[in-house]
Amino acid sequence: MRPFRSSVARVALLGASFALVMPALPLVQPVYARSAPDSFADLAVKLLPAVVNVSSTQVVTAKNGPGAGPEMPIFPPGSPFEQFFKDFLNRNRPGQGGGDSPPAARRAQSLGSGFIVDPAGYVVTNNHVIEGADEVSVTLQDNTILKATIVGRDESGDIALLKVKTDKQLPTVEFGDSSASRVGDWVLAIGNPFGLGGTVTAGIVSARGRDIHQGQYDDFIQTDAAINRGNSGGPLFNMDGQVVGINTAIFSPSGGSIGIGFSIPSNMAKNIVAQLKQFGHPRRGWLGVKIQQVTPEIAESLGLKDASGAMVAGVTDGGPAEKAKIHGGDVILKFDGHDVKEMHNLPRIVADSEVGKEVPVLLWRDGKEVTVQTVLAERPVDTELAATDNGAAKPADLTKPTDITGLGMKVAPVSQDLKDKFQLGADQKGVVITDVAPNTPASDRGLKPGDVIVEVQQTEVTAPSDIQKQVDAARKADRKNVLMLIQREGGVQYVPLAVTKDKG
């Protein structure tokens, strides 16, 4: 690539022409890109033997009956066409023996890729390549086919570890440091696209930290190295021949490569692979919190300078967070020394932490930073991180709906009538919203009758007067927003409402 010498010269000349009236401007140093390799052949030859094809099969029973094939036209009872079409359709449905024949079974096959990480026969691939498989086999570069057993699977992270038995020493590749891969670095993808066999493609790291909404641990490397169906589970290599990613997904309207592929970073994968090898399942750290994003309005209402961190909407009974006295309304700013810039950063940081480790958690609470210590537990399988309901209710001081000044809503204490009307729980606490006026702060935030206000400005409320007191205090402090903890059918959530001086 030719450097832009003429542009640099013009900048330097401009600096000289203004030297009499202003200090000389610093010269802009040109940036030179490293030239592309003459060939990737030497690297490919070294790496190809450790990349395998993964084939999984499962027995699928074909349907026989409604929905298994084309529907028969409706004829008048006794029509001669009725039996004709019935015989024709039954012959062409799965089973081909008529409605009384048992459904036919067939073997469905899935093809993917993988790579050997241990000469003892351990192979890494994607979980979706072998999910539901009755049999899994691995084909080496020399076309040797080996039967594989599944050592462990991680459904959330889409990683699986296989084991094959062989008398010969198997070639291997090693994991590299994916955090060292920079946008623009050259990478090689090797895999089994469309079942063709070992195929090498080259490209660069297009982006890092991609969230493609496949799960809460999304942190993909994006690459423009050609990745197609069948490449799943194959390795993404850096120029040192180290695995920096597991090719997992593509973005494509057509189903083929358009230069947008996604790989699981090796730093995430190698920890999971080690756990699968040792325990047969992933052991992720677990804090036991339900969190939400800190918006600018929430940050302002809490006195935070920046809208960063993860706000705790609730804690799980008996979980590490509850034991560490973390509660709803706290904002997690740092976890074990790692900054929590956004809400979605926290699950990944916690998951990558060692189970049983005691870690410091920096919180924003009551307008100041507070540090607590917590001991991480192992994340339970399919655990819903639900909020707990703490605190004793205060006596209600009103029984009829009360208008909250300037927010555009009416509220009332929890009563049996309101529990029945809005299908609230028997032990429901808080103050119920009974009416919301249009074009008001309450309606703008999507509040509706039946929602329950549990806290205002992180203070428990059980009566309309409690809410009005907190709103008035926010106005007096010149707050632009007041923060409410709202409970509804979908769970609990902190909602900031703009404070106005006009009645809603």
Image (tube, rainbow, N blue to C red):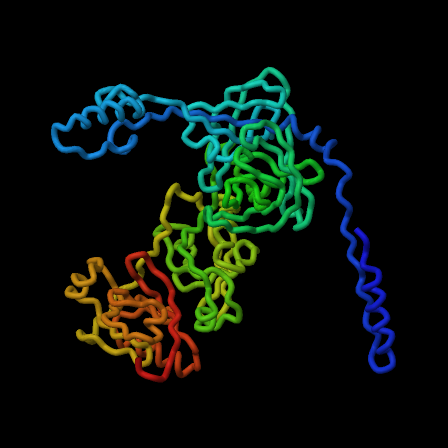
Q: Is residue 58 visible?
A: yes
Measuring from the top left, give residue 311's x and y in whole percent.
Answer: 44, 61
Q: Using the rendered view, name the quadrant where residue 452 is placed.
A: bottom left
Q: Nearer the viewer, residue 61 or 295?
A: 61
Q: Nearer the viewer, residue 455 or 153?
A: 153
Q: Is residue 376 visible?
A: no
324 displayed left or right of 236: left
Q: Residue at x 60, y 30 (%)?
A: 117
Q: Using the rendered view, name the quadrant where residue 67 is placed.
A: top left
Q: Residue at x 66, y 50 (%)?
A: 183
49 displayed left or right of 65: right
Measuring from the top left, give residue 7's x and y in whole percent.
Answer: 81, 64
Image label count: 0
* Image vertical order of residue 352 relative to residue 26, above or below: above
Q: Residue at x 34, y 56 (%)?
A: 387
Q: Using the rendered view, name the quadrant where residue 101 is placed.
A: top left
Q: Nearer the viewer, residue 409 or 373?
A: 409
* Image vertical order of residue 369 relative to residue 145, above or below: below
Residue most extreme to the top:
167
Q: Residue at x 65, y 28 (%)?
A: 48
Pick the quarter of the image with the C terminus. bottom left
Residue most extreme to the front:
80
Measuring from the top left, give residue 112's x and y in whole percent.
Answer: 52, 31
Residue most extreme to the left:
77
Measuring from the top left, give residue 60's x and y in whole percent.
Answer: 36, 26
* Image vertical order of residue 18 relative to residue 80, above or below: below
